[in-house]
Image (cartoon, rainbow, N blue to C red):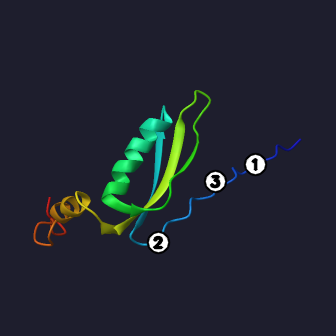
Amino acid sequence: MTSAHTTPTPVPADPVPPTGYADIRIVAASPETARRVAEVLRNCFDSTEQRSYPAGREGGTRLHLTVDTTHPAEPARSWLATSRASAADRPQHGDA
């Protein structure tokens, strides 16, 4: 008797957003908590309308939105500007 060898079915990859955009997924115990986090993100970046879904058997909310990082607003603009290291600050190949 031969045993059937099964190959695991690959999980489809999430589509990658265009350059400069980021897909955000927020999972929280309550819809209000998820909305509060999304509000902070929308204050920092242009974004799409949020979409919410149930999350898990215990309840909770899963919220999705896409942000445009090419058009940051304050405070993200100043944070992004200060967080970018200049080429001189980066370790060179072979530096430890």
Horizontal side of 77 relative to 64 (left or right) equals: left
Query: Sequence order check: which comes first, mark 2 or mark 3?
Result: 3
Mark 2 = which residue?
18
User: In the visual, does 32 lie left or right of 95?
Assistant: right
Establish if 13 lies above or below 2.
Answer: below
Identify the mark nearer the N-term, 1 or 3.
Answer: 1
Q: Which residue is mark 1?
A: 6
Give me the C-alpha separation between circle 2 and circle 3. 21 Å
Q: Quadrant of the N terminus?
A: top right
Residue type at the position of mark 1:
Thr
Instruction: Return the x and y of residue 29 as percentages of the image width and height.
Output: 48, 31
Placement of the C terminus among the 4 image quadrants? bottom left
Amino acid tagged 2: Pro
Which of 14/11 is in front? 14
Could you say where residue 61 lies in the image, as x and y percent from the top left? 53, 38
Nearer the camera: disc 2 or disc 3: 2
- The kind of residue on which mark 3 rests is Val
Of residues 13 and 27, the one nearer the viewer is 27
Residue at numbered disc 3: 11
